[in-house]
Image: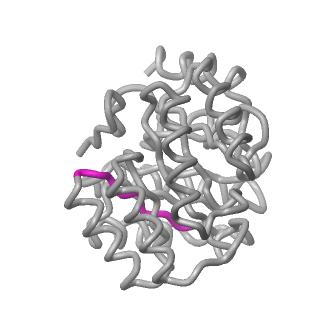
Amino acid sequence: MAVTLKDVVLGEGRVKVIVPITGRTEEELVAQASELARHALDLVEWRVDFFERAHDVDAVLAAAARVADALGGRPVLFTFRTAAEGGERSIDPDAYAALNLALVDAGLVDAVDVELAFDGAAGDAVLRGAHARGVAVVGSAHEFQATPSADEIVGRLVAMQCRGFDVAKMAVMPADAGDVLTLLQATWTMATRHPETPVITMAMAGRGLVTRLAGQVFGSCATFATVGRPSAPGQVPVEQLQPILALVDANL
């Protein structure tokens, strides 16, 4: 089942390109957003955990309004990546839910990221609130030390589907090419046996590069690229990525 974010459809056609903004101040965020508006990409992920005032809801709302204006209508995925999953800072469950729901209520974002392993009640509150306002929810899980078995990867992605997430996303850290194949096998299993939602998968760092370039072959609906500072290991500059994605798509 496809998910539509403004004019971008996840789960249909060519793999979509998501580029993060990681500014620490409002001015940095606006500058980054203005730069992204000049590049060929599909969605912008605001990694708000990089923002130095991320715990101040009013400051986040003010920055979000300026970012949305600078992006000129590009869809925005709002993400507070917690320290436990590779992010820049921690946050308590009530504040996590309140921050996400404030952005949803303000109509300033098109999707929010909710970590599968984060406090269940807080995550479910965000899920309910977002769906009530027509905002999509991306479930996410990250393994920065290893690559789980294919069955475990599939199990986590299916768990996201069962909780009602609109998109299921998982990133792993491969130790070797075998781990990369494990991630791709799990992705293919999701695409063929559990197609209820789009999935986004990637193996990080250099060894996992092929998953960012050829994910469409195996069923991943989106990939992350960079303009400037990356938000995760292995992300490729968008100008280098786009011709490769076009080549893959043209031959499928």
99 relative position to 235: left or right: left
At 46% from the left and 71% from the top, the residue drawn is 151
| Region in magenta | 134-141
The number of numbered discs placed on residues in the rendered structure image is 0
Whether residue 62 is situated above or below residue 35 in the rendered picture? below
Residue 137 on the magenta span: yes
Query: In the image, residue 36 lies at what x, y percent?
Result: 62, 27
The majority secondary structure of the magenta stretch comes to strand
Q: Nearer the viewer, residue 102 or 93?
A: 102
In the displayed structure, does residue 100 sit left or right of residue 205?
left
- Quadrant of the rendering where the N terminus is positioned: top left
Image position, residue 35 (x, y; %): 67, 25
Identify the residue shown where x is 61% and y is 43%: 211
Q: How is the image coloured?
A: one colour
Q: Is 97 situated left or right of 4 in this image?
A: right
In percent of width and height, residue 104 lies at: 35, 56
* 251 to 78, vertically: above or below: above
Residue found at x 48% / y 17%:
251
Q: Is 106 a magenta residue?
A: no
